[in-house]
Image (tube, rainbow, N blue to C red):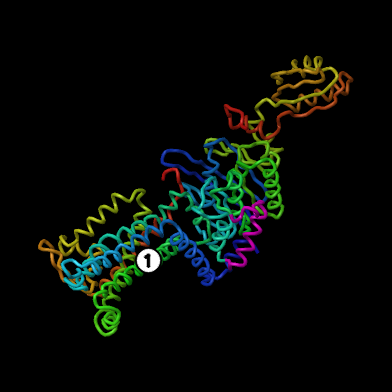
Amino acid sequence: MTVAQETAVRPRIDWALLARQVGGLVRLELRRLLLTRRAVILGLASAVPVAIVLLVGSIPIGGQTVLERFGNRIVYETIFETVFLGAILFFGCLYVFFNLFRGEILERSLHYLLLTPLRRELVVAAKYVSAVAAVTALFMASTVFSYMLIYLPVGFSGAIEDLTAGPGGRHLVAYLGVTLLACIGYGSLFTLVGMVFRNPIVPAGALYVWEMLHFLLPPALKKLSVIHYLKGLLPVPLSDGPFAVVVEPPPAAVSVLGLLAFAAVVLAVTALIIRRMEIRYTED
Amino acid sequence: MSDDRNIVIRDVSKFYGDVLGVNRVDLEIEPGITSLVGPNGSGKSTLMNLLAGLLRPTRGEISILGLPVTRPQDLFRRFGYCTQYDSFPRGATGWQFVFSYLLLHGLDRGEAERLTARALERVGLVDSAHRRIAGYSKGMRQRIKLAQAIAHGPQVMVLDEPLNGLDPMVRAETIELFRQLAGEGQHVLISSHILHEVDLLSDRVILISNGYIVAEGEVPGMRAEVEEVREQPLQVFVRCDRPQWLAGRAFELDHVTEVQLHDDGGGLHLRTRDADRFLRLVAELVAEGGVEVEAVGPADSDLQAVYRYLVHEEEEPS
């Protein structure tokens, strides 16, 4: 039987084979992401919120810690929204996802992946899922650790009571969900940016300004920002200041499904680009 | 031989904007060792990248064993490509490099380990397998790329300058490996500019210059089949007892353009546009007893001569 005939009689999709192939690529990517210098930098970045909460929860100013003076939920929400969501998640995702393909192009090793019997669309999907898993694991750990530190003033028993009987558990789940969705949303965006742009500074700078100034945007344009949907899921509402254009946050289901759909569309565009991609490293 | 057993390139052109990569390439390559020969920038790597789907043709179609190059899920089970890029995933050891990409073929770990060990053994890198590639010599990096390209047992191997950087011993072993693979009925397409090696190891040669295929065929017969070359003067040597007398007779022929006596006085080289007529004359002279000939034959029917005529290199290729 010739090769072409063999191919013709092979089942259209061998799911078990495909799972092994994708599993192989996910393992390869996870090793690249978690066992290299990149992981150290991400780990340090994810430790920043933990350090800040530790600081505001343990150093008394005028006899009270910041957590005690302003309330632990408000303080944590502020830190999460401004530091974690506003900087660390954005730039952490930029660092990892922009380099998902661009890093391999600069390293001149992308062709090894494109010479394997995997559809290019699956290469995009597997690399993206690996990166989401790696980044989410680090940032979720950071969210959990930093959140636990807000209970410093009330101690272990107070923490257990709030997490189980009070709103603490629900809030933590919300923060974890926002962390995951931020990685999914920003991750897809920066994967595409890495495929299209050689240098991230201009596109990432423009996106950052757009995201950070979203509160000034008219309602229709707010819908075109990732952070608008993420903020709508945060458990403690904070004021965006006197100049903010205030709109009703979208329902949670719209935020979640909207962000997932957004990520799917952006990844589909990325897959279309990689399908037509040529390896010409000299131009990169 | 049918298309689904060969590499088939139909009217393929590739332009980088206004710059020509290759133009109107039409080839059908059978199993065995085929060498793609041409100077730097002639289009060898472009053609190989087109075969691997790393570049998309501006025009034309390519199929490998009947499979289109746009279907990696089918093609790369049977196709291995050792590129010219001297780059590797950061931090990988030789073993990890070969093994991790084998897993992407869907093999279980045991099978991937077995094939990795076999590939490393074939290229002689077993002892260095667990060292980082970053610490490898140029020759070792060439060999680990080769191991990665052949590890999954492809039926078609495309190897871009695979002998570069190899020391003579390893070079000989690698050529032997190519012969083994070709002997197993596989396609081995090699690009090179080291002509004497190509001459020795190839079943067929494709000459490429400025993006055009200028000649193709089996090395011994190539010269005769190429009209452009046939019109070029052929160098013939004769070892005989009366070279000066023979030189005088040769100059009477209008197709002989140059005669040079050997320093030892035991023969001559000459250039002729009609070697057959000259050889007939030599035969007649021998029959008449005018000259005793020890040996006679073409002096430049090797690949290098064909290459020189067709590619018009200013510098002699190495």
Q: Position of residue B217 (x, y in %)?
A: 66, 41
- Residues in magenta? B107-130
Q: Position of residue A225 (x, y in %)?
A: 24, 62
The residue that appears at 51% across and 41% down in the rendered structure is: B22
Give the answer, above or below, for where B267 lies relative to B53.
above
**Residue B242 position (above or below residue A77):** above
In the visual, does A113 lie left or right of A68? right
Residue occupying image coordinates x 63% and y 37%: B194
For mark 1, name the chain. Answer: A
Whether the magenta-drawn stretch holds residue B128 is answered as yes
Q: Residue furthest front?
A: A63
Above-or-below relation of A204 to B277: below
The residue where tag 1 is placed is A138
**Residue B63 drawn in magenta:** no
Q: Position of residue B29 (x, y in %)?
A: 62, 48
| Residue nearer the viewer, B23 or A121 | A121
> The residue tagged with tag 1: helix, strand or loop?
helix
Residue B211 x, y percent position in the rendering: 52, 38
Q: Amino acid at mark 1?
A: Leu
Q: Is residue A260 visible?
A: no
Q: In the image, what residue occupies the spot 17% across and 69% down?
A: A63
Give the camera-side residue of A103 and B57.
A103
Which quadrant: the C terminus of chain B?
top right
- Left or right: residue A118 versus residue A53 is right
User: In this orientation, which residue lies closer to the viewer: B64 or A93?
Assistant: A93
Instruction: Name which quarter of the figure residue B221 lies in.
Output: top right
